[in-house]
């Protein structure tokens, strides 16, 4: 059995290669998904490994830059998953998508049957990728998640820690709601799925830990955690209590973000036969602990 993981140098792909039984990672050097003609190379790769499971964690994730590079974003986030689905054969294809397919106007957590309405090029490209996979013949799952955080790669937690060491004042938006999803939480769920429910129904699933927060509260949580860590106490220039909550309008970015990114995971829980998923703090703390012992976060600190 082989689990072939695309995007193996990203946050999620790296974690999957590390945690999943029989995983083989594919990095950009091996296959560049932005190139015009990759279908032949992709088919050879799939022929060579004959995977039982394919995980697509490969994506164009520069949300703001995508506003300027829509063609590239669609090539990587829509065309590539479509090609994977076309050539997946009998493998179970697990493709990752995002809360950015929603406009965030709902006051409730989103379920898989809610209509999509992306606000940005990134969100539109992810939606196009979902459709390319779902409309194919492949035995495919599209898993939407939110606010990924892992020890490998770039994420909000690392940015906040870096800023907290550089600045004595920090403003963070407090009206965008969602939940941090640690990559080990996702890899653990995937391992359970592959081992116990490989014949899961094809389709769309939401998967995040339980709980909710906003970026401001999440930033305070991270700084508070760092402030209790002996290696960080002298480096921090700001306390959690001094972070200033601001509205989204006060921090304009090229790509609009959904205000509500909360996802209802009922369908996933039912498919796996579990009543609860882990609270986000339980799965976030060990990841933050690992990030806090990484050195250095910012090479300019040395
Ligand atoms: N990050 C989040 O907060 C978040 C939230 C919701 C959903 N998601 C979704 O979850 C999945 C994993 O996200 P992530 O945070 O792990 O992403 P990430 O850290 O940005 O990793 C993306 C990976 O894709 C690779 N990649 C990008 N362009 C490529 C190309 N042209 N050819 C080959 N490889 C290419 C990158 O390679 P390099 O390392 O070489 O650049 C990287 O390894 C994605 O589908 C994303 O849309 C993410």
Image: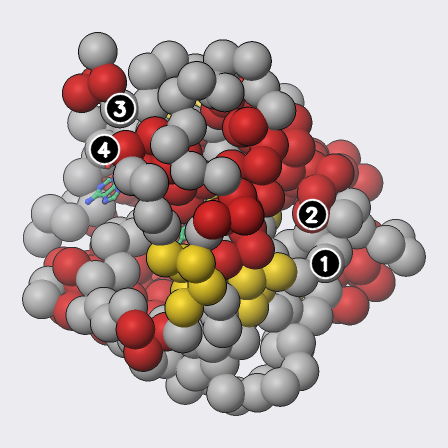
Q: In x, y percent, where is residue 19?
A: 60, 24
> In the rendered image of this protein, does residue 98 appear above or below residue 233?
below
Q: Earlier in the sequence, mark 1 or mark 4?
A: 4
Q: Earlier in the sequence, mark 1 or mark 2?
A: 1
Which mark lies nearer to you, 2 or 4?
Answer: 2
User: Distance from label 3 to label 4 (Cα)?
Assistant: 24 Å
Instruction: Give the labeled residue for mark 3.
Output: 298
Nearest to the observer: residue 3 or residue 236: 236
Asked whether mark 4 and ligand 1 are closer than 8 Å, the reply comes as yes
Q: Earlier in the sequence, mark 3 or mark 4?
A: 4
Q: Quadrant of residue 27?
A: top left
Instruction: Give the labeled residue for mark 2.
Output: 280
**Helix, strand or loop under label 2:** helix
Q: In x, y percent, where is residue 38?
A: 17, 45
Q: Earlier in the sequence, mark 1 or mark 3?
A: 1
Which mark lies nearer to you, 3 or 4?
Answer: 3
Nearest to the observer: residue 95 or residue 232: 232
Question: Which residue corresponds to the image point at 58% horizontal and 19% vertical from the top-left?
Answer: 229
Which mark lies nearer to you, 1 or 4?
Answer: 1
Which mark lies nearer to you, 2 or 3?
Answer: 3
Label 1 Cα neighbours within 10 Å, binned few <14 / some 14-19 / many ≥20? some
Left or right of 157, for residue 280:
right
Nearest to the observer: residue 162 or residue 33: 162
**Helix, strand or loop under label 4:** loop
Where residue 28 is drawn, which disc sits there? 4
Q: Earlier in the sequence, mark 2 or mark 4?
A: 4
User: Distance from label 1 to label 4 (Cα)?
Assistant: 34 Å
């Amino acid at each position: 059995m082989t689990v072939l993981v695309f995007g193996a140098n990203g946050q999620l792909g790296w974690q999957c290669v590390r945690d999943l039984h029989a995983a083989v990672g594919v990095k950009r050097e091996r296959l560049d998904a932005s190139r015009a003609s990759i279908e032949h190379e992709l088919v050879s790769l799939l022929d060579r490994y004959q995977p039982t499971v394919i995980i697509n964690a490969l994506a164009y994730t520069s949300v703001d830059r995508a506003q300027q590079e829509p063609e590239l974003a669609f090539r990587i986030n829509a065309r590539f998953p479509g090609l994977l689905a076309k050539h997946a054969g009998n493998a179970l294809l697990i493709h990752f998508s995002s809360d950015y397919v929603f406009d965030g106007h709902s006051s409730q957590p989103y379920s898989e049957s809610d209509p999509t309405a992306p606000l940005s090029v990134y969100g539109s490209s992810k939606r196009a990728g979902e459709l390319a996979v779902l409309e194919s013949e492949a035995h495919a799952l599209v898993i939407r998640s939110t606010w990924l955080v892992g020890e490998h790669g770039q994420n909000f937690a690392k940015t906040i820690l870096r800023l907290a060491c550089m600045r004595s004042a920090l403003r963070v938006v407090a009206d965008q709601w969602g939940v941090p999803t640690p990559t080990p939480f996702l890899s653990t769920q995937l391992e359970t799925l592959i081992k116990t429910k490989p014949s899961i129904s094809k389709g769309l699933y939401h998967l995040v830990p339980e709980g909710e927060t906003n970026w401001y509260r999440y930033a305070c949580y991270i700084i508070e955690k760092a402030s209790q860590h002996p290696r960080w106490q002298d480096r921090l220039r700001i306390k959690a209590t001094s972070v200033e909550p601001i509205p989204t309008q006060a921090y304009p970015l090229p790509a609009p973000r959904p205000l509500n990114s909360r996802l209802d995971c009922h369908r996933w829980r039912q498919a796996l036969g579990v009543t609860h998923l882990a609270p986000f703090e339980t799965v976030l703390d060990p990841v933050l602990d690992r990030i806090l012992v990484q050195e250095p976060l910012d090479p300019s600190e040395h």
